Amino acid sequence: DAKTTQPNSMESNEEEPVHLPCNHSTISGTDYIHWYRQLPSQGPEYVIHGLTSNVNNRMASLAIAEDRKSSTLILHRATLRDAAVYYCILSAGYSTLTFGKGTMLLVSP
Amino acid sequence: GAGVSQSPRYKVAKRGQDVALRCDPISGHVSLFWYQQALGQGPEFLTYFQNEAQLDKSGLPSDRFFAERPEGSVSTLKIQRTQQEDSAVYLCASSLARLAPYNEQFFGPGTRLTVL
């Protein structure tokens, strides 16, 4: 399975944008890029996914590099409720999700 | 709306006991997944059902772990002769369609199992 690399943790201030990076240099042409997040004491929650083009939804934006070897999850205005572990995951074919350790996002008021 | 529910939310078992963990997926969801999450780690895949068929059980750590979904809706994960290393949060997820790389999975809150 293609692997992803994320920073262990990041910090942000409330109301500021947050850019969460993910490297996936061994990504294949059929791999989708997924982001999930896990708030404390809850199950993971879907955030966004994409294949080649940048994607926007009500929660976040996903910026995918032209060579697809990296991507960035963008939270436009962080709130305290966005403090969570964010997972960047590659999925292809009929494979299930393989979570890594993710990035713990700390948001300060 | 109703999401994925799991019961019990917390379970304490003595080493050697059998436990059964229940998952109620979102109604109509075809795919169902079980994951195990150890403290400080990301979830790890255990098994996958498409309706009542268990199509992938490659993640089950030993033959003490058994999962079923007999009518294609509710699923039960059973752990026999529990060991301390089984202590973890067990997460259930469901997805509307059959497994595909772009399908969103909806997770339940998990069952925290502590084996003493």
Image (cartoon, rainbow, N blue to C red):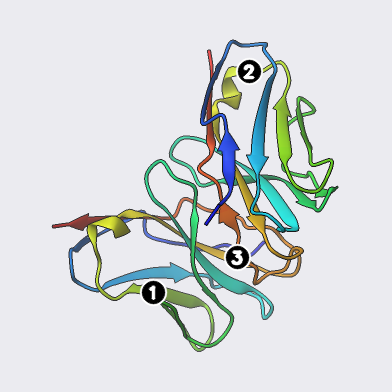
Q: Which residue is mark 2?
A: B83
State the separation of the CA atoms marked 1 and 3. Answer: 15 Å
Asked if both marks, 1 and 2, belong to the same chain, the answer given is: no
Local crowd size for mark 1, using a 10 Å CA cut-off: few (<14), some (14–19), many (≥20): some
Which numbered circle lies on residue A60? 1
Left-right relation of B84 to A54: right
* Position of residue A12 measured from the top left corner of the image (x, y, whole percent): 21, 63
Q: Is residue A53 above or below residue A11?
A: below
- Residue type beneath disc 1: Ala
| Mark 2 Cα-neighbour bin, 10 Å: few <14, some 14–19, many ≥20 | some
* Element carrying mark 2: loop
Image location of residue B12, percent across then percent down: 53, 18
Q: Amino acid at mark 2?
A: Gln
The residue located at (52%, 53%) in the rendering is A100
Instruction: Tell me the subunit letter for badge 1.
Output: A
Which quadrant: the C terminus of chain A? bottom left
Q: Work out how far the residue at label 3 is from the one at label 2, CA to CA, in angstroms.
A: 33 Å
Residue B60 in sight from this viewpoint: no
**Which label was assigned to residue B104?**
3
Q: Are marks 1 and 3 on the same chain?
A: no
Above or below: residue B34 compared with residue A61 = above
Percent position of residue A8, x then y: 36, 54
In this rendering, position of residue A76 left or right of residue B45: left
Q: Residue at x 65, y 40 (%)?
A: B23
Evaluate whether label 3 is on the same chain as label 2. Answer: yes
Chain of the residue displaying label 2: B
Q: Earlier in the sequence, mark 3 or mark 2?
A: 2
* CA distance for labels 1 and 2: 41 Å
